[in-house]
Structures are given as structure tokens and as C-alpha cells.
Amino acid sequence: QVQLVESGGSSVQTGVSLRLSCVVSGSTYSYSSYSLAWFRQSPGREREGVAAIDRDGSTVYANSVLGRFTISRVNYKNTLYLQMNSLKPEDTAIYYCAAGGNGLGLHIKDFDYWGQGTQVTVSS
């Protein structure tokens, strides 16, 4: 059983920074072999990919967050991070971490395991 647990969500004002964390666990899960990603979903909208990182550390970002968000992973801690700077109200959403596969993309179908999400609210 693979488990992903996100943390770090909060209610903040425009322009501030937040760092989200996601701890991955599971006796059969080889953390370092899988690609990891952050997705988000706001009310009335479909879940969308934010950023992904493969096992080699290569990254990809959605255009809407490019230059403001940074995804990283620390394999010995089984932890994924999302550093979010210059937050905007449109970043308000539930943020989910995901794991699976070994590619580098932002498609839901590429990921097998999902966390429960952490809420980020940005007010103007």
C-alpha cells in the first residue's frame, strides 16, 4: 500500500510564499524510481498538473506557474516539495501530490498513487 501525505497548505495573502511537502511511504514502493508531481483543483474546475519531476531530477511546469514555483525531491527522505513564490488568488486550490511511472508529464493518467490534498487559499 502506497501512501502520500501532503502538508503545508495555508491561507495567505497575495505575493507571499509557501512550501508544500509530500511524504511517500509503502513497503513495496521504490520512491527513487518513480516520477512525482503536484496537481491542483479549484472549485468547478478540472484537476490540472502544476509541476512534475522524474527520477533523474528533470522537471516540467505548467505555464501558469513557470518562474514562480519550484518542484524538488529528496530521495533519502522520501519527500517531494513544491516551493510556491509570488502567490496569486488564481493559485487558490487543493494541491495533490502524485506518484507513478517514469516519464515527465502533467497528465493525470500517468500517475497511479495520489494523496488526499492540502488546501491553499490566496486572498487579494
Image (cartoon, rainbow, N blue to C red):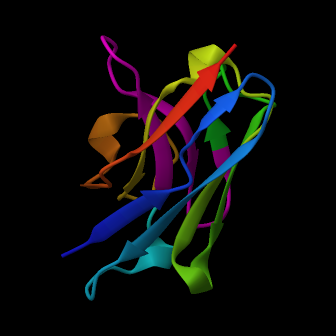
Q: Is residue 38 left or right of residue 108?
A: right
Query: Can the viewer see residue 50?
Result: yes
> Residue 82 colored magenta?
no
Q: Quadrant of the C terminus?
A: top right
Instruction: Give residue 28's position: percent from left, percent from top.
Output: 26, 85
Quadrant of the image occupied by residue 119: top left
The residue located at (40%, 21%) in the rendering is 42
**Relative height, residue 95 to residue 57 (above, below):** above
The residue located at (56%, 42%) in the rendering is 10
**Relative height, residue 110 to residue 5 (above, below):** above
Task: State the residue in front, 32 or 4.
Answer: 4
Give the number of callouts. 0
The residue located at (63%, 39%) in the rendering is 60
Q: In this view, does 24 lie to the left or right of 71?
A: left
Instruction: Give residue 77's position: percent from left, percent from top.
Output: 57, 82
Task: State the residue in front, 23 or 37.
Answer: 23
Instruction: Give residue 38's position: percent from left, percent from top.
Output: 49, 44
Query: Can the viewer see residue 83?
Result: no
| Region rendered in magenta | 36-59
Instruction: Give residue 13's position: percent from left, percent from top.
Output: 71, 26
The residue located at (79%, 34%) in the rendering is 16
**Relative height, residue 77 to residue 2 (above, below):** below
